[in-house]
Image (cartoon, grey):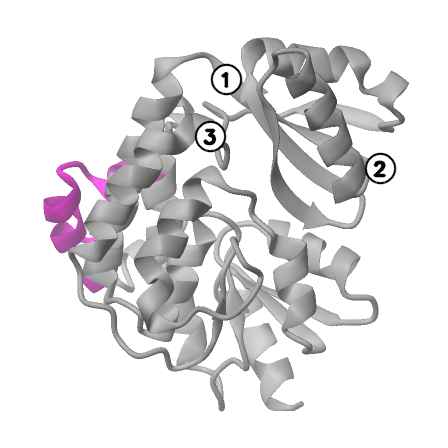
Amino acid sequence: MGAELFDSRPDLLGDAADEILGWSLRDICLNGPDEELTRTDRAQVALFAVAYATWVEFSRLLDQEPSASAGHSLGEYTALAAAGAFDYQTALRLVALRGNAMARAAAGEPSGMVALIGVDRAEAETACELRRSDGGRLWVANINAPGQIVVAGGRDDIEWAVEHGRALGIRRVIPLNVAGAFHSPFMADAGAAVEAAVRGVEIGSFSFPVYANVTARPYSEGQVADLLARQVVEPVRFAESIAAMDVDAFVHVGPGDVTAGMARRTVAGASVLVASDPGSWEDAAQRLNEG
């Protein structure tokens, strides 16, 4: 992951980052193994670092700054750092703490997440409320795009959702390969740790608006600690965020292209680009600059 960046951006992905983390970012990203790279505490850091380095390279090619930005879950840290809320080193420390805190919370009790396909938020909330009324613990965790909602809960709750999904009118229920019930009350201890850490750092001025996962509205500088703490335990309102931006061109910045697909499904007719490697970010920048 991010192989083309490690040699070109040693200032971001080299020894200084490794000193902050206490492990080799380059080795994990380029050599794995997969079970190491996909650990919550490793994956969050790796994704943030590579996405931010991608943003730095991509942004150098742009003639203007974004009108607005948002990030899905962890990606919110990339968006905040890109906008100047905190510098890269501070963000790297915060992401490392967040990843460790969420991994500890996930290890405390077996839990997970499932994607519900073919339902809206109200229908997903109804399913979760039905499960909770019977003593279960199931909550809406991600509102990704129309017809795509993710819910989180204990292992028994996830099994219940898989077993009863079709009877509840859900077209498909897809278990996700994640370590725990993220963006739910299962992460309460992690949320407290994130809030304490963010309150200890200085928040800079935003150079462009960042839409918060929790509110689907732009951050103000005084909200950062509160909203990042709440983000760990409350739903990611990503579809609402990008719809609220009222723009007609989106760029997914960083590994993969997942949020590009969410944008296409959410904002009809929008131009959606991907900046994930040198070829794609050069093409995306050229298309944006040409208008």
Q: Image quadrant of residue 117?
A: top right
Residue 101: x %, y % from top left: 29, 32
197 left or right, relative to 70: left
Residue at mark 2 to residue at mark 1: CA–CA distance? 23 Å
Report the mark closest to the observer, 3 or 1. 3
94 versus 23 height, above or below: below
Kindly identify the residue that appears in the image at 66 percent across and 46 percent down: 143
Kindly identify the residue that appears in the image at 17 percent across and 60 percent down: 201
Can residue 167 be seen at all in this image of the molecule?
A: yes
Which mark is first along the chain, 1 or 3? 1
**Is disc 3 placed on a helix, strand or loop?**
helix
**Badge 3 local density, few (<14 within 10 Å), some, or many (20+)?**
many
From the image, tell me which residue sits under label 1. Answer: 111
Q: Are marks 3 and 1 in contact (CB under 8 Å)?
A: no
**Badge 2 local density, few (<14 within 10 Å), some, or many (20+)?**
some
Quarter of the N terminus within the rendering: top left
Say the numbered circle drawn on residue 177.
none
Which residues, given as a range, are shown in magenta? 11-30
Q: Main secondary structure of the magenta part?
A: helix
**Is disc 1 placed on a helix, strand or loop?**
strand
From the image, tell me which residue sits under label 2. Answer: 118
Q: Amino acid at mark 2?
A: Gly
36 left or right, relative to 252: left
Q: Image quadrant of residue 154?
A: top right
59 versus 50 height, above or below: below
Which mark is first along the chain, 1 or 2? 1
From the image, tell me which residue sits under label 3. Answer: 185
Residue that protrudes farthest toward the front in the picture: 133
Can residue 10 be seen at all in this image of the molecule?
A: no
Residue 122: x %, y % from top left: 78, 41
Q: Amino acid at mark 3?
A: Pro
